[in-house]
Amino acid sequence: MSEIVVSADWVADNSDAVRIVDVRDAWEFDGIGHVPGAVNVPFDAFRADEHAAEDGDTDGAGAADSGDGQGMLPGADAFAELLSDAGINADDRIVAYDDTHGVFAARFLVTAELYGHEPERLHLLDGDFSAWRLDHATTSEVTDFERSEYVVDPPAETPLVGIDAVAAATDDPDTVVVDTREEWEFEEGHIPGAVRLDWRELVDDETRGLKPRADIEALLDERGIDPGKRILLYCNTARRISHTYTVLRHLGYPDLAFYEGSLTEWKAAGRELATGA
């Protein structure tokens, strides 16, 4: 496996060489404490106020397909300003964490990747803040960072796919469309042909980190999520797929697609839904 998902010990050993980003709310960062040297970039700060499918924006965000919405991406200028305020540079190695098994932190990392941050320099803390503070020191002191000039440089190719590409993928035997929502949501309505993999099935509630690799791979194999195929992920607003996307990258899956518009855009466009298990 890669070093995309990293342990608390790894972060402690490399703290001088990484920028640590805490995506919890400010009151948690200040009141509960945080990883020493972390900067607070709350989750709501790097999310759009509403889904692009709801405000009629279908111009896309670097994706190749017409009709592709921006989902919940905040916009390149807003993201650059946010990271500049945090004193982060485009060549920094970043570790992100939250206190929710990593799902919000993974969303930050995916957003950074889509706006051009080198994917191999983006890391997720395994086990979140609750796991960190079991064996490592926390602090309430805020580290001051000089403002930077973060430059967004979206790559020519990203894992983003548009709604038409998703529709085509439902009939493609070499693509597995994966719904990362809960079972009841899936049964209520999902993209035809999708298989279900609740993102929480990959994490251990006790350790708060990833389950052992063998257990994850057995589950993925059971669901037909084959590393030899293209894996296309969606949920409702692209938060939950961010975690699954990060885990699959960590496991070495070579061909991943990310439907930012997710089911919110799919439904808004009046596309067909399947129901039941």
Image (cartoon, grey):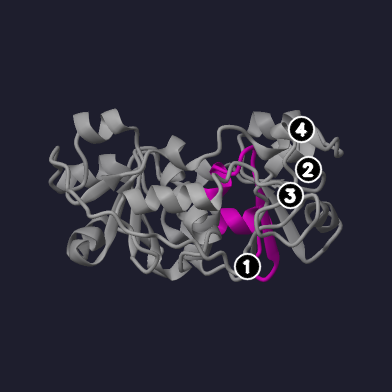
**Three-letter amino acid code at the position of disc 3:** Asp
Dot 4 surroundings within 10 Å: few (below 14), some, or many (20 or more)?
some
Give how far apart the Cα atoms at labels 4 and 2 are.
Answer: 7 Å
Residue lying at 12% horizontally and 46% vertically, measured from the top left: 137
Give how far apart the Cα atoms at labels 3 and 2 are.
Answer: 22 Å
Give how far apart the Cα atoms at labels 1 and 2 are.
Answer: 21 Å
Q: Which residues are magenta?
A: 216-243
**Three-letter amino acid code at the position of disc 4:** Gly
Residue 189, labelled with which disc? 4
- Give the structural element (helix, strand or loop) at label 4: loop
Q: Earlier in the sequence, mark 3 or mark 2?
A: 3
**Three-letter amino acid code at the position of disc 1:** Pro
Q: Position of residue 147 (x, y in %)?
A: 28, 54
Q: Position of residue 123 (x, y in %)?
A: 38, 60
- The reply, left or right, for residue 249 in relation to residue 124 is right
Q: Which residue is mark 1?
A: 227
Q: Which residue is mark 2?
A: 191
**Three-letter amino acid code at the position of disc 2:** Ile
Q: Quadrant of residue 258?
A: bottom right
Give how far apart the Cα atoms at labels 1 and 4 are.
Answer: 26 Å
Query: Do we see residue 1 in this rendering?
Result: no
- Name the front one of labels 1 and 2: 2
